Amino acid sequence: MRESAQTASRLLTATDVLVARPARPEDAEQIALLSAPFVEQGLLVARPLAELAERSQGFVVACEGDRMVGCAGVAPSGSSLLVYNLCIAVDWQGRGIGRHLVGIAQTIGRELGYGSLLALTQYSGEWFGKLGFSEVPASEIRDEWRALFRPGRRSSLYQLRFTSEPSETEALPCADSSRPRSDTVDNLRVETHA
């Protein structure tokens, strides 16, 4: 676990102070603003502000001070946990924040007893592959996962099965600004809609 935190800290400069925490309803507008450029490019599904506010407690956000620089939603899908709406501010990409947020999603999934983490993507399959995800062949897509696919999008489903030992990515710490940095997101609400 210590090595993972050291690896993550090398990706950020000494002046970068990021806090990863569960989102709050008042974060919905920042989640929408952060997501907007990716929605415009067709990389993310458009979600109304009201929907983001309703689902905000199922999001983890990474913030530098008052600025949100990353977010990811999590929602159950049968025996798996889906990570969705993963996006990082353009000027913060390449620093390990997305990897950190996926690691938090892994921790949440494992702690809640899910068997795997899912990601549905059109363009980021290679990136998820680097994190240990494997593409699920169309013939193996379970009925419970079919509802995740949006008509008109040519997405592929990726899965990371949980093993008995947490992965290097999963071991990254997450903090709520009012709690010690080693604390996990134990107050994140995971809802049944994606």
Image (spheres, helix red, strand yellow):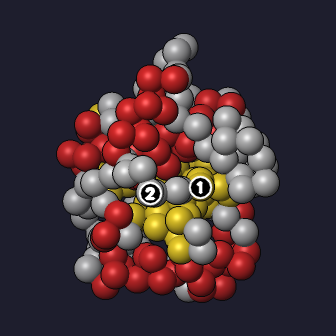
Q: Position of residue 180 (x, y in %)?
A: 74, 41
Question: In this orientation, which residue lies closer to the viewer: 62 or 57?
Answer: 62
Q: Tell which residue pokes out farthest to the front in this image.
A: 14
Mark 1 is surrounded, within 10 Å at the Cα level, by few (under 14), some (14 to 19) or many (20 or more) other residues, namely some
Asked if residue 94 can be seen in this view, the reply is yes
Report the residue marked by disc 2.
Answer: 15
Q: Report x, y in % for residue 141.
A: 38, 42
In the rendered image, is residue 79 in sight?
Answer: no
56, 180: nearer the viewer = 180
Q: Are marks 1 and 2 in contact (CB under 8 Å)?
A: no
- Image quadrant occupied by the C terminus: bottom right
Image depth: mark 1 or mark 2 in front: 2
Q: Report how far apart the C-alphas of labels 1 and 2 lie in the structure.
A: 13 Å
Secondary structure at badge 2 equals loop
Tell me if residue 100 comes above or below residue 189 in the rendering. Answer: above
Q: Residue at x 71, y 52 (%)?
A: 176
The single residue placed furthest to the top in the displayed view is: 164
Q: What amino acid is found at the position of numbered circle 2 in the picture?
A: Thr
On the image, numbered disc 1 is attached to which residue? 19
Comparing 29 with 123, the one in front is 29
Q: Secondary structure at mark 1?
A: strand
Type of amino acid under label 1: Val
Residue at 33% in and 36% down: 131
On screen, residue 48 above or below 160? below
User: Residue 105 lies in what quarter of the image?
Assistant: top right
The spot of residue 86 in percent (x, y) is 43, 60
Q: Residues within 10 Å of mark 2 (few under 14, many from 20)?
A: few
Residue 78 position within the rendered picture, expressed as x and y whole percent measured from the top left: 60, 42
Name which quarter of the figure residue 154 lies in. Answer: bottom left
Q: Is residue 93 above or below residue 170?
A: below
* Residue at image point 54% right, 14% down: 164
